[in-house]
Amino acid sequence: LPGSEGTAAMIYLDVTNVGDQTVHLTEVRLSSGSATGMKDTGGPAWTPVAALPIRPGETLSLNPQGEFAVLSNYDSNAVPGAMIDVALVFGTSAIVTVPTQVFPASTTLR
């Protein structure tokens, strides 16, 4: 979470494709419905990303050095220390929901 209320938060995570076909991550959102947008930081400006492919056996890492999800609207349940459900939406319309711990913005995770 950001240091101040109303500021966009970043979602960092690793997603491994254990299947035998390429899948495309199209959205990351809180299961409560809060909106996110995926961004790529590879250039001079953050660029929106519509879908991120994950080949069989590959791990996609959303992190500050590459692509990440920006959470722009979230409810008061998303506080440091809380467990919230994050929904990963794939191009096949499949949704995988994972419990995720909320950390303050100043936390180093790696």
Image (spheres, helix red, strand yellow):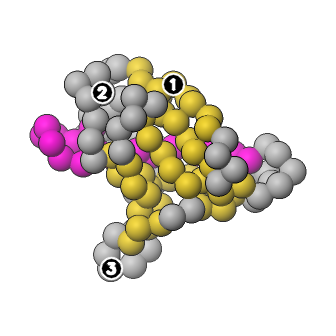
Q: Residues within 10 Å of mark 3 (few under 14, many from 20)?
A: few
Residue 59 lies in the magenta stretch: no
Tell me the quadrant of the picture where the N terminus can be found. top left
The residue at 41%/20% (across/down) is 83
The three-letter amino acid code for the residue at tag 3 is Pro
Front-most of 46 and 104? 46
The residue at 69%/45% (across/down) is 16
Q: Give the x, y percent position of residue 23.
A: 72, 55
Residue 17 in view in this figure: yes
How far apart are the alpha carbons under marks 2 and 3? 30 Å
The three-letter amino acid code for the residue at tag 2 is Ala
The three-letter amino acid code for the residue at tag 1 is Pro
Marker disc for residue 99: 1
Q: Which residue is mark 3?
A: 44
Q: Mark 1 or 3, which is nearer the eye?
A: 1
Q: Are marks 1 and 2 in contact (CB under 8 Å)?
A: no
Front-most of 71 and 102? 71
The residue at 22%/42% (across/down) is 2
Q: Secondary structure at mark 3?
A: loop
Q: Give the x, y percent position of residue 54.
A: 69, 57
Q: Secondary structure at mark 1?
A: strand
Marker disc for residue 78: 2
Left or right: 12 in relation to 24 = left
Extreme residue toward the bottom, this view: 44
Q: Residues within 10 Å of mark 1 (few under 14, many from 20)?
A: few
Magenta range: 1-17
Front-most of 86 and 66? 86
- Vertical order, 99 against 107 (above or below): above
How far apart are the alpha carbons under marks 1 and 2? 12 Å
Q: Which of disc 2 and disc 1 is earlier in sequence?
A: 2
